Image (cartoon, rainbow, N blue to C red):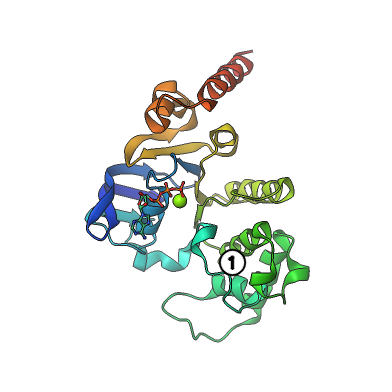
């Protein structure tokens, strides 16, 4: 089986200036993968490169064994909330429905199955009753959920999400976590940018840690090692001790 992502020597950035350097890693299919790193470490840049929204300066990116353009209909993308123009006059339903359009066929005729998948996705994120509202009138957490619904409507193989947990309340957080569990059961791959270390080790089973360059990629068990957390976040991270303690506690529980 092809890897979900196979990235070699990826250097990418803006206006000729690299932001991420020489990244090499793979993400196998069927994992819930956290991409973690501090602010400005290049997490969104990495995701935008994977989605083909910016072009690599160097290196190659294979998605499900192909170039992104060949498999785009199997990939769903949830952008970071700050990067979206929320004043665009479209309804919640219309945004979710966009998940059903292939990028090379935006004028396709809608089938009943498209409408059904869209409504089902909105129901899963508890937004059915808001379906006719303009997205600009929703709260931040609700807007986040609209984009998750758009991704779900796509019924993709690989879900790429940029900070879906940022600024959401605990109800939305639980709803997203429930979706992740379902995706895992269905053997889908999910790649999620996340910057809260406290929760990262509960949510994900595979990790890509970056700080402009790759620090670590692999299974959770090895990712917990303090040296990687140190290299990713630098020495002055107050959460580090708590994580270490949490990690030790978990290991103790696992051993007992
Ligand atoms: N459109 C852009 N044009 C120029 N520079 C950019 C652009 N977007 C991001 N950058 C720069 O690239 C670097 C990495 O940004 P990126 O958004 O990838 O970081 P991030 O890890 O996603 O951060 P955050 O946790 O804040 O979302 C930053 O220094 C940022 O200023
Ligand atoms: Mg970002």
Q: Quadrant of residue 119?
A: bottom right
The spot of residue 165 in percent (x, y) is 60, 48
The residue where tag 1 is placed is 150
Q: Is residue 156 left or right of residue 19?
A: right
Q: Residues within 10 Å of mark 1 (few under 14, many from 20)?
A: many
The spot of residue 129 in percent (x, y) is 78, 69
Q: Is residue 217 left or right of residue 182?
A: left
Q: Is residue 45 above or below residue 118?
A: above
Q: Is residue 9 above or below residue 50?
A: above
Q: Residue at x 25, y 61 (%)?
A: 15
The spot of residue 156 in percent (x, y) is 52, 62
Q: Is residue 137 left or right of residue 55?
A: right
Residue 78 visible in rendering? no
How many marks are shown on the rendered structure?
1
Q: Residue at x 41, y 26 (%)?
A: 230
Q: Nearer the viewer, residue 155 or 196?
A: 196
Q: Secondary structure at mark 1?
A: helix
The spot of residue 142 in percent (x, y) is 68, 60
Q: Nearer the viewer, residue 82 or 4?
A: 82
Q: Residue at x 53, y 34 (%)?
A: 197
């Amino acid at each position: 089986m092809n890897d979900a992502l196979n990235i070699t020597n990826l250097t990418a950035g803006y206006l000729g200036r690299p932001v991420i350097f020489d990244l090499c890693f793979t993400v196998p299919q069927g994992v819930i993968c956290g991409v973690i790193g501090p602010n400005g470490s290049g997490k969104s840049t990495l995701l935008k490169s994977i989605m083909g929204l910016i072009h690599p300066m160097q290196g190659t990116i294979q998605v499900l064994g192909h170039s992104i353009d060949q498999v785009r209909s199997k990939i769903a993308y949830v952008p970071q909330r700050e990067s979206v123009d929320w004043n665009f006059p479209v309804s919640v339903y219309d945004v979710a429905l966009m998940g059903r359009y292939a990028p090379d066929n935006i004028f396709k005729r809608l089938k009943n199955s498209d409408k059904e998948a869209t409504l089902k996705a909105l129901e899963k994120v508890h937004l059915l009753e808001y379906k006719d509202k303009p997205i600009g009138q929703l709260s931040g957490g609700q807007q986040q959920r609209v984009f998750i619904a758009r991704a779900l409507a796509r019924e993709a193989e690989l879900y790429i999400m940029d900070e879906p947990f940022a600024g959401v309340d605990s109800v939305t957080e639980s709803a997203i976590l429930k979706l992740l569990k379902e995706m895992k059961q269905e053997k889908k791959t999910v790649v999620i940018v996340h910057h809260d270390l406290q929760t990262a080790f509960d949510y994900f089973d595979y990790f890509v840690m970056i700080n402009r360059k790759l620090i670590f990629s692999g299974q959770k068990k090895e990712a917990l090692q303090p040296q990687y957390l140190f290299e990713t976040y630098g020495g002055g991270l107050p959460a580090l001790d708590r994580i270490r303690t949490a990690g030790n506690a978990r290991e103790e529980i696992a051993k007992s």
